[in-house]
Image (cartoon, grey):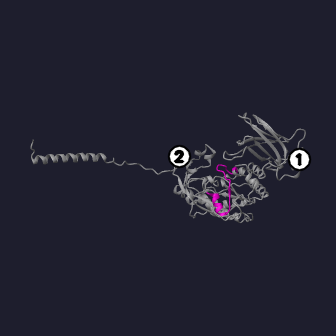
Amino acid sequence: MRIVSSGRLRRIATAAALAVAAACATAANAADPPPTPDYDVDACCRLCPRAGDAASYSSSKYLEDFSVLFEGRDGWLFRSKMDLTTTFDITDDSLGELRRLVTALRRRNTELVIVFQPPRGLMDPQRIAANWRAQYDFDAARRQYAAALQKLRSTGAIVPPLDRLADPDKNYDYFFRRDHHWSPDGAEHTAKLVAEAVRALPQFAGVPQKTFSTHTSGILAKPGTLQKVAAQICGGGYSMQYVPAYVTDAGGGALLGDEAAPQIALVGTSNSDAKGGYNFAGFLQQYLGTDVLDVAISGGSFEGSLLHYLPSAEFQKNPPKILIWEMPYQNYPGSDKNPHKIFRQAVPLVNDGCHGRGAVLSKTMALHAGSNEVLFNGGGRVLPLTAREYQFDIQYDDRTVKDMSTVIWYVDGRRETLKLHFNQYVDNGGRFVAELRDDDPEHGAETMLGLTVEMDQEPAKPVNITAQLCARSDASPTAVALSAIP
């Protein structure tokens, strides 16, 4: 056995300890994280210079509606033309057409209430950046908006005074930061004013009452149409905006049975559609204390849900005492649109077109490529079918058809090309109803000779239609009597 001195043992132990310490130090250094890198941080979600160039929005009608985007306070986006307008395009022609609808509905004992949604800049001016706020005449916008509401009232429609909500010092946001829809807060404050106006109507006196309560149901995430366009033009993106979501439930206290059909109906856009999550119909129920039939359609634009609802069994069998029509101000058919084209469809649908009425002319046929003569005022006699007293009703056997091109011919050689279109979200059931042209005395006095349906190409499968011409509900007894002539 080899004997080792104590001194050498100490030296061996010291060397071993140093080796272990060195190994531990090496291991510790290997476990240390690398140095934190330095980053250059730029502000998120800023508009690029292209967003301020009107040419960036010229590629489509959709983009043109957003021209031009600019940044507001607290992450808001605005459209310089649409959101900061101080003028409202309401023509005498449009008022005359709207008056006809008000009159037709009253004949069915239905009162029309119009919710004319204001622009974003008017309702949330505190969110406009200082440089743009200096260019925006808020007082002029509020005066002109109030004047527009008064013009609409001249038709006989009930128009709640939403200009009272235009307050820079209010403690809520009427619209979303980067979206064109109203927020749930905006929907609720609007519903309060609408309910106040509706409750004052004599027609409301007999409406069954019950209790409704509204409570939060979660979170509503809103990406925003304005920020989507900003991302399309500039790239990048914005974060979601989150707000409380609400739902309104019925309690008890109905004076009549729950089986009764609602006596108040709501038509309109995605602002009113329950799918949007803004709970406008729910808030109306809460502040009115009664059921509201919500038939608004997202993507239906100005007239879509109205034209869908009027011929429906819900309206025809149980016309509501009060019809609330929500419409964003920019959707109203001013000088850039033909209001007669819209209302010449809506007015006859109040009485379900030619359904249940005697037809003066009628025909069922299969369509082919080219011109299809579906109605003809001839065959040995020409009836006095003056345009101001008649309407047509055309039903396709394919109920998915949403477009129809017609030519209406008159005895004096004139003709009118009329193209009718329904949005993809509006179910028209393959049916097209419209009055003959009568937007001025000269056209109204013309005698209709015939109507053709135009087809660009041969249909992929057989398509049959049934066409009828009948007297309007406001026609003279002489015009109505023609339907009895064999």
Q: Quadrant of residue 254?
A: bottom right
- Residue 56 on image: x %, y %: 58, 45
Classify residue 366 as left or right of residue 140.
Answer: right
The residue at the point 18 percent across, 46 percent down is 16
Q: Which residues are magenta?
A: 279-304
> Real-space Cα distance between discs 1 and 2?
65 Å
The image position of residue 193, as x and y in percent, is: 66, 63
Q: Residue 103 or 212: which is nearer the viewer? A: 212
Task: Report the quarter where the C terminus lies.
Answer: top right
- Residue position for label 2: 234
- Classify 450 as above or below 276: above
Decide: marks 1, 2 in contact (CB < 8 A)?
Answer: no
SS for dot 1: helix
- Circle 2 SS class: helix
Numbered tag placed on residue 484 in the rendering: 1
Kindly indicate the quadrant of the structure image that contains residue 393.
Answer: top right
Amino acid found under the numbered disc labelled 1: Ala
Question: Can residue 142 be seen here?
Answer: no
